[in-house]
Image (cartoon, rainbow, N blue to C red):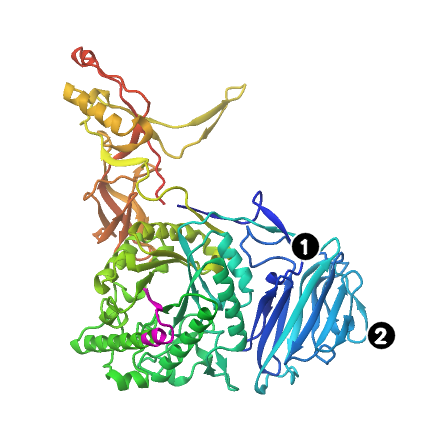
Amino acid sequence: MGHWLARTRTVQEAGVVSRFDPRFWTVNFPRPMMAAVTVTAPDALRVDCVFYRRNDLAGLIWEAEDRFDHPLLAYETARDFRGCRLRFRWRSGGVIALDGVNGPVLTIEGRDAAGATRAWYVRLWNYAAGTPEDAVVTIDFATVSGGFAHPGEAVPVWAGDVDRMFVSLVAPGYDGSDAALPAPVEGWAEMTGIACAGPGSVLAIGDVVVPPHGLGIASGYDDSYHLTPARLLRNALQLGYRGTLVHYVGMSHYFRLDAGRIVTGVLNAPCAAWHRDFAAVAKRLGYAVIWSLSYELFDAHCPAGWKQRRADGAPALTGWVPPSTLLSPANGDAMAYLAAVARAFLAIGQAAGLRPRFQIGEPWWWVDPATQAPCLYDAAAVAAFAPVPIASMRAVATAAQRDTLDRAGMCLAASTAALTAAVRAAAPGCVVHLLAYLPTILDPQAPEAKRANLPLGWASPAFDVLQLEDYDWAAAGDRVSTARGVAAAEARLGYPPGRQHYLSGFVLRPEEAGQWAAIDRAAADARARGVAATIVWALPQVMRDGFVHFDSGEEGEAMQAFDDVAFPLALGREAEVTPGFSTQIVTAAGGAEQRNASWAEARCRYDVGPGVRSEEDIAALLAFFRARMGPARGFRLRDPFDWHGADEAIGTGDGTTRRFALVRHYGTSVRRVTRPVVGSVAVKVAGVARGFASEAGGWVVLDTAPAAGAAVTASFDFDVPVRFAEDGLSVSRATFRAGVAASVPLVELREDFT
């Protein structure tokens, strides 16, 4: 397995696409209204909207620069539209028509011929032929003008340096105020027969196809609602993701609202239209879609009685801005709502021919991150299991508190069982998945949290598949915590690897893109464990950061470059050790030198021939040489002169970092130690021994992060990774009996364990 972060397309495959291709339009709008754009034909698109306020406005957008596709799949940036002529048929309903005040306007944003930033407003009715709700619109960007009434108010557009353009859609009753409409208004518009002609009508577009690999992909509607499903899934397919596709339906864009902007129904019209198209495209591309629904809901629209609450009455709020909240598993209305949402999405999938698959995503009792106070005290929870006060999940000390957490866990398990029963009744044969987020529910500082948030009621066979995610650990490269967490979940719930999925990711911010290396490695570890599916979370971040995964070779028992075995002969003091550097020296005519050191640390060469003392040694050496295939495979060697490190400084605490690399110091020079001797490592923080786990490659992971400024030291024995230096090996009885040492040269290996 391997990965690459692509920044831009260079020599990779490219094709062409017509400018204004329906797949590459987007939508934008203010909360809480909703809009979606879908592709209805190769030359057609549809926008569906629902408006709640008198100033709600949806924009159907074409960007001159592709800011959303993966860098290897993006279309070229082309800001000059003057050579383009755009023609399409416009049809609409439920929105102000083409001829009305505040009717559809094409806003063109960019710069004028002098380079000054400005916008032009092109009334589509001025370029239409037909009726206000069914007309053919033709725009020549070389001669188009803005302004309401032509020719008296015409303002010539200079379309030579455009950033974006968008068509505005508003509901009848629009007046620019923040007042609510009397009732939510649903509207739509279609552009069909879209055709772009002229010398600027064709764009280059990335057409890379990554070979299919062993990973699935996850996505989320809250991050993808503005794109067409065809565009989103084109990225997934051409980046090599096949098979399993987890689609989180989100927590903020799918529901219906009443006039007071509180959740009142299941799926709004734009969401339903988008997902019908998504399911159809996914089916056509061969994806197995797992519809994912969590207990999370956008706080501003959540009914007050549905929310989990702390003992002081404050609602459970996440760290998102603006925040979401968590639904109480004890509230019957909230759980009935989730069941209705699940049935609606499964029905969409079944109508498209998809086998029903459903994920209950991260159901849990929320724990306030700042205070660690559990949110077990909403009215429904108090009535259901009478929780006693718990100030912090990290300070559960009494039997009554533990009993409260056990009863909270039973309540949570009952809610997921009811949801499972509801989806199986609505979609017989539905495969049900349970997703658990390990870093929170198995927080080592809150060992009792699992009573409430990893309840025994989830034990096999409650669900068909247990899905585990741990992106805090995975992104930080904390493989020890991942291994411990997976083992603990497996032991507690009893799902073998063949009935587990692993979700690897995700990278929250673009400046943290370096975390993809650890995420890719975590995916490799999961595949090595034998889980049924390994899924990258999530596609929007993959596209944003240019992440490319590829399988570099066969998994499993391929030839290993290193055998973790020791050289079989003991070395005496007569063995030869030669540290060496690579230094380029340039001597000027006057004798002055310029020296350039190519290596930061020495690379040792050894001659271990003097360790051959008998015919038995010769036989062992020859057998070992054959087993290593000469220099093809590395092995361990104990350097007789340098094999121990005592209280070596390996880092300084920052309050967060737990993973440190073992090193040896030689003055100011530092040597990376990748092959410590098992059982020989001891770690201290500020001079006090600390608990830790060892990782391959000479890494230690402390049980708790050292405080900021605390010195971290380690003592250890270590071997040197080496290989035979030559393809041939020559020894004989005559050599040994004559007292002449054979020559057995070895060379140190540079190992990259990041």
Number of labels in the image equals 2
Label 2 environment density (alpha carbons within 10 Å; few <14, some 14–19, many ≥20): few
Numbered mark located on residue 245 in the image: none
644 or 451: nearer the eye? Answer: 451
Which x, y percent locates residue 72? 55, 50
Question: Quadrant location of the N terminus?
Answer: top left
Is residue 23 placed above or below 515 in the rendered structure? below
The kind of residue tagged 2 is Gly
The kind of residue tagged 1 is Ala
When asked about the image quadrant of residue 716, the answer is top left
Which x, y percent locates residue 744? 27, 21
Circles 1 and 2: CB atoms closer than 8 Å: no
Residue carrying label 1: 78
Is 432 inside the magenta-drawn segment?
Answer: yes
Q: Is residue 163 visible?
A: yes
Query: Which element is circle 2 on?
Result: loop
Residue carrying label 2: 152
Distance Cα–Cα, label 1 vs label 2: 32 Å
- Compared across the picture, whether 657 is left or right of 161 comes to left
Please give the name of the residue rendered at 67% of the width and 67% of the height, measured from the top-left corner.
Answer: 192
Question: Quadrant location of the C terminus?
Answer: top left
Is residue 713 placed above or below 51 in the rendered structure? above
In this picture, which residue range is highlighted in magenta?
421-437
472 or 503: nearer the eye? Answer: 503
Is 8 inside the magenta-drawn segment?
Answer: no
Which x, y percent locates residue 178? 59, 83
Please give the name of the residue rendered at 24% of the width and 40% of the height, measured from the top-left corner.
Answer: 676
